[in-house]
Amino acid sequence: MNTELSSKYDPSAVEAQAYQVWLEEKCFAADPAGPGEPYCIVIPPPNVTGALHLGHAINATLQDILIRVHRMMGFNTLWVPGIDHAGIATQAVVEKQLKEQENKTRHDVGREGLVERIWQWKQQYGDRILEQLKRLGASCDWDRTRFTLDDMCAKAVRETFFKLFKDGLIYRGKRLVHWDTFLQTSISDDEIYHETVKTFLWHIRYPIEDDLTPSPGTPGEGGGGGLPGDQRKDPHPTPPPAHRARGQDSTANKGTGLVGSAPRTVSPHGQEMVRNADPTATIRSDVDPAAFDEDGKAPPRANYMIVATTRPETMLGDTAVAVHSQDPRWNWAIGKYIRLPLTNRLIPIIADDILVDPKFGTGVVKVTPAHDPNDYAVWQRHKGQPDEIDLINILTPDGKIGSDRPEWSKYAGMKRNAARAQVVEDLKSAGLLEKEEPYETQVGHSDRSKTPVEPYLSDQWFVKMAPLAEPALQAVREGKIKFHPERHAQQYLSWLGEKRDWPVSRQLWWGHRIPVWTKSWASDASPDLPYLVPEDKSTEPRVIDLRVGGQKLILVKKRDDRTVTHYIGVGACDNESPAVLEKAGFVQDPDVLDTWFSSALWPHSTLGWPEQTAELAKFYPTSVLLTGRDIITLWVARMVMMGMYNMGDKEAVDALTPSPGTPGEGRGGGLVADKQNDPHPNPPPAYRERGQESARRAEALALGLPFLDVAINPTILDGKGERMSKSKGNGVDPVDIIDSYGADALRFTLTKMATETQDARMPVKRDANGKNTSDKFDEGRNFCNKLWNACRFALSNLENVASASRAVPPPLENSVRDADLTYTLVDRWIIARFNRTLTTCDEAIKSYRFDVYAKSCYDFFWGDFCDWYVEAIKPAMKDPARSVQTAEVLAAVLDGALRLMHPMIPFITETVWWRLNEVRPRRGIPGRIECPPSKRLVLAKWPLATSTDASAEEDFPKLQAVISAIRTIRNDYQVNPKVTVDVFIKADDDACGKILSSRELVEMLAICSLKDARADLAPIQNAVTANVAGYEIFVTGLIDPNAEKTRLAKEIETKEKSVSSMKARLGNEAYIAKAPPHLVQQSRDQLAAAETEVIKLKESLKKLE
RNA sequence: GGGCGAUUAACUCAGCGGCUAGAGUACCUCGUUUACACCGAGGGAGUCGGGGGUUCGAAUCCCUCAUCGCCCACCA
């Protein structure tokens, strides 16, 4: 291997070689049996839909920084890479490709054909994604790469579903889905596009049936039923074994999760599966009744209501009319009935303050629960209430009016538009059409068939949220999991707080097939059953928990009616369970699980759960989750829930959740309230205070938490603040940047952008090759180039200087030696600066302030190390008397700097490290910069911050100020850089002593000759002067009286400004009385200093006249 | 409609009660001294979005308005 550093920095060569070495030497491989505290991150698996973008790049870079830092700190470190199958999204791109390339639909190739094609896609893009991560420098343990659809994850998915089912947390329920009447399938939200359609808004009269006492058959009487389609007549099926559900709602939730044609579970709030019932919706209680009564008189009570609709044909399925409870025009009618035109059905007038906005339209809304999401929500809200309403489906799967109701038989078989025309015509002839006005509306269309979609009730599987969500809420409320920045916890809390049940089935082909098998047969003939359940002759609903061939299997037997028995089988973790069931004639549910179902298990499924693997034991809970804020709800919340559910110790989890009796109302404020009570919210613990951390970890382990911290990285937007996307053409491909700038430069720039803000902007432009790029990466590239060259220079110097003969390094315990005193000021200063930078970086990384880490490294390396230190030691390095000592410091500081920056800039630092090891294998300054040797930087020890050096940090900046002042004068007078100027300095004895002891430095860096420095300096004629840091500086030989007058006048002006502002401040009695004394003193000192400087400047000015 | 965020130099951003408000890029001047022109030295550049308030003191905290953006929900 060639360790020479090329004179020109070439990222591609450096990067390829270093990465290859890391891989060959298995530097990223984790060993659960190895030493060290665990530190684990599981990657947010990128969707296999396409290549990685900058969002992934920043996310992966930050994770890699954490992983590399902790690896160097001696943690047993594991970064699990992986990819997400991304159900809908991936199927959609492959279907699109199929259409474009072969002009086929998924129905043409069939389920197996399509799935096979998607696997091909996965192979191609999955590999590409992993390749991209490698080019970025990600130090993942590649042997543990996972895919959310691989066998390991599949096992975890089946086990979880099984467990949830057994615990009664999974149920079958109805949900309104988008229905494509042409393809006769439900489609996802993503596959809908909206088209503006010109239609009419029809205003229809609904006659109020006055003075009608509710008859026994009408709803509201509590259970009389009698309405066709009423599902309440079904008996509740037998609950599965009553495993104790978690959380305060447990009692209300037991005994569900089973077969059924309609949701029967009523959670305390009636929200159990309402996708569209938004419990946070504003209830319009602020309505002022007077607003409807402009004349001060109550309006006359009408004997009909007017409803407006764009879809009159749906009135066949109306089951109520809703008004606002505070609307004086209509609230008197609540509880009365409408005689629904055309069908002659009686439907109730109900109050629903969420649905109805009294300020809009007539204030009356027709309610069609089976065909409108909002109306469905109304049905949900009123279910179980005295004003419960009915639900009537009027459509057949192919989008025609059904024939199951005699009252609308006239319309049966008509398609939407025909039915609409007929209904309108009939209303007209009945004189019930009040008005017909042109209207534009957005109609959802199916992306597949290009036909309008219908909201359609369909059977879906749901996961009950309340018992899962409550512990997950508590875990964050009580700080067991911490968000960084903290404010992001709010989104998590408010979303989970809704506890909306989670619809987990998707009508797709790509994904984890729902592990449910069903079979129905006449109850007197069950030929295959004995194979599974030898002795079951019962016709009663029951749950049969059994093992077949050692496989966990649960069977639910439900008597549907007298002649047919349904069995549901749910297979658990083994691949053979399906086979067992299928052999017995069971048929698997055609749907797949929501892609987030497998994602929710990611932190523990990737470590081997449900097997008790060594990885799981060592690395769970993971240390931190780094992700974008857009998936806090979809993903983070679900991981916490499922982690606690699968991994948590039941007692610990239960103890976390307050029982219903405990006062819980005080915690409405959540985080905010806690923050106010705690004087030190989220205190930044010193990085190595391990005790606190391991206590937190133990607690998290008991609770089953998937991670201790959640760090949110910013979203990268383009220069206009818009999200990057392919369709907009404003996306930047990280690989393009790596090709042109290098991975280190990309990483540095992204790290520096990782502030606490939620968005980071990146102006995008096109490069010469027509690719998108951004000037933002210049900074990273420049820094990398600087780093490369400074290292080359340092190494070439070290090559020429022999190592000190003493044995190095001695153990850390050795305190600072007396020999330290022999170090020069600049040596002591750079060592102090290094240690201070290290401390800052430790804190920054601990608190996920990656920008601070990047900025500190940049300032230290470029601003201190290159600009001052390296320049300052040039003479000493050429002087045999001093070079040995100087080289020791140089080597140690360089060593420390490489370690410090390696996590962010891994390739260059590693490459330089190899050369440094050759040139100077032993290095370190005992007690100041320890440099324990390591062949590879990636595995080297993280530096330990040591004491700082107050006097060096105070004195050196004064030298810098003097040098800068002389340089400024030189520049102002445009002195040729080769010309040496003469300088005299007046200051007190101590200060003069200091400047004289660094005389060489000042003379070299300011290109001057320091003629004299003393307290009693004789007046200097015709000098250009400056006053800094207690030094009065005179530069002779270049005076231009007029220019100097202007210069001094300007100087005096600014100084006087500061004098007057200080005076004003000190003249304020309240300031003297109330401000902290040290600030008052500081102001006084500043005033004094400024005043004397003004006097001196004025003296100088006088001399010129 | 709800939530979150942003508004500081020409651009991209730090700073979040107390230094004369900083950095990078761009710009201007000077300079190729063998680490680096992807460089060095120096410089100009800002009523900290507007308006109120709290405070001895506000870019920083509170209220309000305006503009922009992101996420979520929705438009009978």
Image (spheres, rainbow, N blue to C red):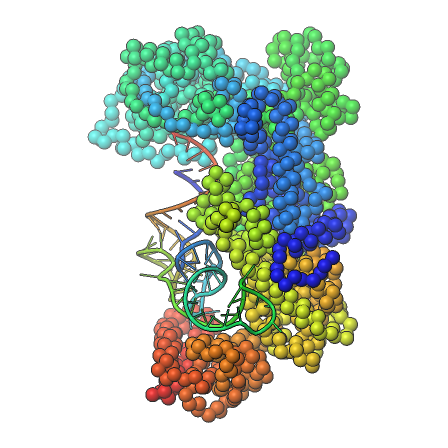
- Name the one closer to the observer, B7 or A494: B7
Quadrant of the rendering where the C terminus of chain A is positioned: bottom left
Q: Is residue A1033 visible?
A: yes
Tell me: residue A972, above or below residue A259. below
Q: Is residue A968 left or right of residue A54?
A: left
What residue lies at 32% left-to-right and 15% top-to-bottom? A207
- Name the one closer to the observer, A223 or A1067: A1067
Q: Is residue A680 visible?
A: no
Q: In this view, does A682 lie to the left or right of B50?
A: right
What residue lies at 65% left-to-right and 39% top-to-bottom? A127
Quadrant assignment, res A514: top right
Tell me: residue A356, above or below residue A133. above
What residue lies at 32% left-to-right and 12% top-to-bottom? A425
Q: Which residue lies furthest to the left in this view?
A: A295
Across and down, in percent, residue A496 comes to 53, 38
Across and down, in percent, residue A688 comes to 66, 59
Across and down, in percent, residue A336 comes to 36, 18
Quadrant assignment, res A560: top right
Across and down, in percent, residue A1005 comes to 54, 77
Quadrant of the rendering where the N terminus of chain A is positioned: bottom right
Tell me: residue A938, above or below residue A569. below
Q: Is residue A344 left or right of residue A40?
A: left
Tell me: residue A148, above or below residue A984. above
Q: How many labels does the image show?
A: 0
What residue lies at 60% left-to-right and 48% top-to-bottom? A60
